Image (cartoon, rainbow, N blue to C red):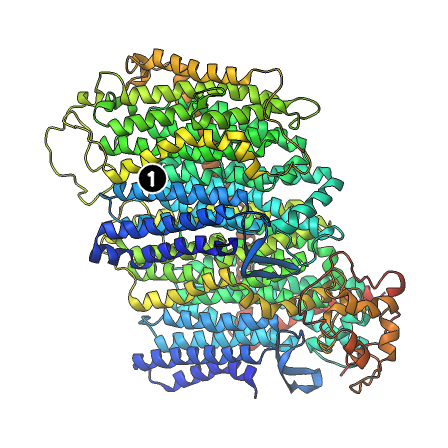
Amino acid sequence: MNLLSIIIFLPLLGALALLALPERKTKTIQQVSMLTALLTFVTSLGLLLKFDGESYGFQLVERYQWIAPLGIGYKVGLDGISLMLVLLTTLLSIVAIGCSMKIDQRLRAFMICVLILETAMLGTFLSTDLVLFFVFFELTLIPMWLLINIWGGKNRAHAANKFLIYTFAGSIFMLIGIISLGYLYFKTTGRLSFDLVDIQAQVANGKLWATAIAAQPYIFWAFAIAFLVKSPGFPFHTWMPDTYAESPIAGVILSSVMVKMGTFGFLRFCLPLFPEALKSQVPLLVALAAIGIVYGAAVAAVQPDMRRMMAYSSLSHMGFVLLGIFSLTRMGVLGGVYQQLNHGISASILFLLVGYLAQRRGSTMFSDFGGLKAQTPILAAIFLLGMLSSVGLPGTNGFVGEFLVLLGSFQAAYADQFSIGVVVLAAFGVVLTAVYLLYMFQRIFYGKITNPENANLADLSRSEVALAGVLIVFIFWGGLVPNSFMKPMKVSVDATILMAKGMVDHRPHWDSPETPLEYYNLQKPIRHVEALKPIIRNGPKPFLMAAPPQTPSPAGMGIRAGSGAPKPAAAAPADSKPVAPKPALGSRLAPRSGSATPAKPAPGGTR
Amino acid sequence: MTYESIWLVLLFPVLGFLTQALLGTRIEKALGRRVLGFLAVLPIVLSFAVGLVITLGLKGDRSAPVTICEWITGGGLSIPFELVVDPLSMTMVLIITGVGALIHLYATGYMNEEREFARFFTYMNLFILAMLILVLGGNLLLLYVGWEGVGLCSYLLIGFWYKDLANAKAANKAFIVNRIGDWGLSLGLMLIVALLMSSKGAILDGRFLSYDTMLPALKTVLAAHPAMATAIALLLFVGAAGKSAQFPLYLWLPDAMAGPTPVSALIHAATMVTSGVVLLNRMHIVFEMSPVASAVVCVIGAFTALFAALIAFGQSDIKKVLAYSTVSQLGFMFIACGAGAYWAGMFHVTTHAFFKALLFLGAGAVIHAMAHNQDMRNYGNLRKYLPITFWTMVIGTLAICAVGIPGVFGFAGFYSKEAILGGALANTHAQINGVQLGQIAGWVGLGVAALTSIYMTRLTCLTFLGKEERWRSIPAPVVDAHHDDADHHDEAHHELDERHTPHEVPVSMWLPLVVLAVLSIGSGFVLAKGGAFEKWLYPTALPVLGEVSTEPSGIPLAMYSMIAALGGIALGLVFYLKGLPKNQGLDESKWTGLRRAERDQFGFDNAMTIAAVEGGGDIARGLWKWCDDGLMNGFVEGLGKLSGGMGDLMKRWQTGYVRLYALMMLLGLVGLIGFFALAIQRGVH
């Protein structure tokens, strides 16, 4: 069953269905679009049942030829990193549609835009073909441009164009990067392909970059600029305040998912494909992330408009995600990936509430508010909870992600990967976060009502509370039982780190997920030293060569050939699934030293 | 009941919190405030009872963590939700729930006339929960959870009367200044984790922050890295200084008095602000290994004690005097912790919890009786109207002044202050390059003890003694028109004026006073007898420092302390028994320069506020206008304008044909591809 394709295109189907409806049937339009979003969400929950959290390979893979001569295919697959982002997208689409029911101008077109946007985002997270990824990545721009341009605020045209041109300019670089990678792949293998799995396999065995290592930083930055613009990272964020200030609320909520396409891009492409460049560029990238955290928070504190404040707040919060990812430590990347979800939840609840305020008052300027707590206690209470999640208070989801990011980056800095000042600065961002959020809460809710227009402001209705309540549940669920969200991510995160940090031939590849990650492990403590002793003692080569290949592999002995062999399977039965963690810190598998030095295994098979 | 039932202690406040939060207003409407108040006090009492039973049954196997469930697992790190039952945590549990229950009871009376009764007790029960997590948590991250949790409750309760924007600002200040401390604390945690992860043979199962695995590992690792001990200790102390209001992070505590008085008693005197001392006791191994950090702790503690005591002289607001007194007493506790007499710090935490809660609740009773006017210059002769409050407050004052006769009997503070000063003077741990900063701190502390006696006597005299009933000189308003904000139900419902007659507070309010007074009299004597408290808290010698003496040889400390306490009281009586001195009256222009400087915290608060709020605001606005709008956005928009301008130049290209645009895009693309092709080619060779 093509579950992934169904999830990607369900919203599009809904959009087509809306096209068939007459514009004036508002009620039906509302129902159909809501139903589509709900159905997509429920279907995406099915992924949880199908997903195997112990494997780092792509799952539920679908591969079709698309532009065969160029080696471009429709290839989608799911891993631990994309799983939660898909769920976040489908969940927040419900919220975005739910809060837009009252739009009185061209509702049908609005809903179509939102649904197409959802399809594009889901496609982005699930593509495993570089060109397909690019297509979906760019497809998000059009509905978003329309949303801003048609349903936006006063300066909507300018904001929409700026958004479009800025992000488009960024992704042009990525396109060049993709073409370069395709070219390099062709040079290496004599075959044209834009399949991420194929290309990464050549990166893992060192062949792709063997002759073009000097070009790696350029191509890395071609991708990085596109993703930094999208995330947004300092100093590529200036499209964001205008976009947030002018976009309709549904657009802002969805763009809190869209920014994850940037950080996701780093995880999916920059980490696995550019291991050498990464090493030299990390100090710069983490510095940008830390500056973004502090700068965003500082500038957020003096904004007169809630929406602009939220834009800078996003810059600050996404800085944590970037910092975590580039720490390249297990805690840091896991925290970064988790923080993507948390920011999605906590930012959209604040957007939602700001949207409610805007609906009631037609303004989001702080100067128009003040003293609302007495008038709208429920709104104030929910706002407080959302704010606490954003502040990163323990017990809420924001804390877990932020703390893991800081721990991980501190660990990396302690190991001299980059300056410790970066972490100290980033940690100070937590103080500034409290400054601007508390100041915001004070300006909206505390004191006496000064503006008579607020004197009769209605509190949240039942349906509004329900919509916000869903997100509140996730705030505490994510803070109190974070493992239920982090568990599916772990293996994919570990694999991604090893792809980025491993030496040539000691990088996992997606096309042989049977090989336990412990085999590649360079940095983390091995959990089962006993079980891995044969590998440590003999080095990987003899035992791999001795093992008969289980699957016919044209190019001979890939690492995957060994993993199915009876001997290691018996020796290390629980490698990827620790039963009772009895690890030994410090006793590390260091394949580059002593007898463990691997004799180069034969090149990994190309399919 | 074994120690494994410790989760019950947390369960009751959780239930109480949920009841108040979700059903509070309904219960209030259906069954009335008495029931709601009862439901707020009950969980704390139950927690106290369970805690007491567990404490009495505590023997052997003391610090085995009780793991409740998994919390954060991943990335090689494992942080379970685990609780630690040991003398330190149980001491705090009993203080928190015991004093907490009394203050809850008191608050049912104090808050009876306020709106949003349920909201108040929601926050209060949540506070108890967070504070219990702080002390019971089995790892540093759970401590951090409680740490920020109590900070949140403090924020919510300081801003409880949110309609007054000043309260909201005080709440923000408290939260933000605390966050600066948390910044240090979190960096300390990170350093610990990074250090342990990078050292060989440390912790096997990823429980890097759990006390039972972390502390022994730290001991071995830090022995090899003494500089790291200092770094970790100082970072932890930044956190402690934030929460425990040490210089320069004390700034938030005086402003925090904006909250209702029971809040000041519970959070800003008895429990939360002592968290820093608890942290130092918990992590004492790190401080033992770093004489430098310990010396810093001593110096900051002594300076804070002195600085705050001086400021207390310039305050006319009864709660502000007590607030600075709290800051000063916390300084004493840190002197002890810096000197290595960790138990003495905790001893003072315990006795201080009793007498300072008593003093605050007494002050609350006075404020309650005086129509919520907090200015002592309007008080006088209140012993006539509030006899119970008066006598209990006198006991509290004697306890904080550390009055006692060596070898016979003393009030609670006598024994704990004695242990602190003795510990500081008898030890040589806290030193930098041979300068005995710990001992210097001890002598400073002795001087501050005398100052304490004077300003506390001042408070008692101005409030309760003298013949003058100074509020009688406030003229009653001519027209008693109803206020323009009739629904403004906070502390200023009706003003204090000449017609006012104070009345003794109801039983729910004076009963806690009496209980706390008994504790303020006897607790020091009982706990100090035969070194009971020290043996209970630290049954074995310290791992690095060994036995820490609190009896300096060759110094008749007990004699000195007695002179300081009694002399201070005598001096205070000389100055203030007659009533309000002329140069401290309502007309502050007649004040001496020194007193005005003390009133203004020697200009420190003002300077910091200007630096942080205005300076920070200016920097942020500058960044926004110049850097963001000007430079970065200007560049982007400039590019847009440039291409627009070029478009004007090349109008004939603007044919409106999409295919032409597509061609242009293609050309641009080709150019870029060319660049990258070159790069790749260059890379190839």
Q: Is residue B440 left or right of residue B327?
A: right
Q: Is residue B66 above or below residue B533?
A: below
As shown in the figure, which amino acid type bears the numbered disc 1?
Answer: Pro
Q: Nearer the viewer, residue A294 or A549?
A: A549
Q: Residue at x 37, y 60 (%)?
A: A353
Quarter-wise, where is residue B15 in the image?
bottom left
Residue depicted at x 73% and y 78%: A512
Instruction: Tell me residue B157's x, y (percent).
Output: 36, 44
Q: Residue B461 placed where, x, y %?
A: 31, 19
Position of residue B247 measured from the top left corner of the image (x, y, whole percent): 51, 30
In the rendered structure, the answer to whether residue A543 lies left or right of residue B463 reads right
Q: Looking at the image, which is closer to me, B87 or A248?
A: B87
- The N terminus of chain A appears in which quarter of the rendering? bottom right
Q: Is residue B567 above or below residue B153?
A: above
Q: Is residue A509 visible?
A: yes
Callout 1: residue from which chain?
B
Q: Which residue is mark 1?
A: B262
Q: Front-most of A107 and B21?
A: B21
Pointer 1 local density, CA inside 10 Å: few below 14, some 14–19, many at least 20:
many
Residue A45 rendering spot, x and y as whole percentages: 50, 77
Circle 1: element type: helix
Tell me if residue B327 can be seen.
no
Q: Which residue in the rendered view is the most extreme toward the top?
A: B574
Q: Is residue B365 left or right of residue A181?
A: left
Quadrant in which residue B322 is drawn: top left
Q: Is residue A145 left or right of residue B389?
A: right
The quarter of the picture where the C terminus of chain A appears is bottom right
The answer to whether A133 is drawn above or below residue B440 in the figure is below
How many marks the image carries: the answer is: 1
**At 41% from the left edge and 69% from the top edge, which residue is drawn?**
A96
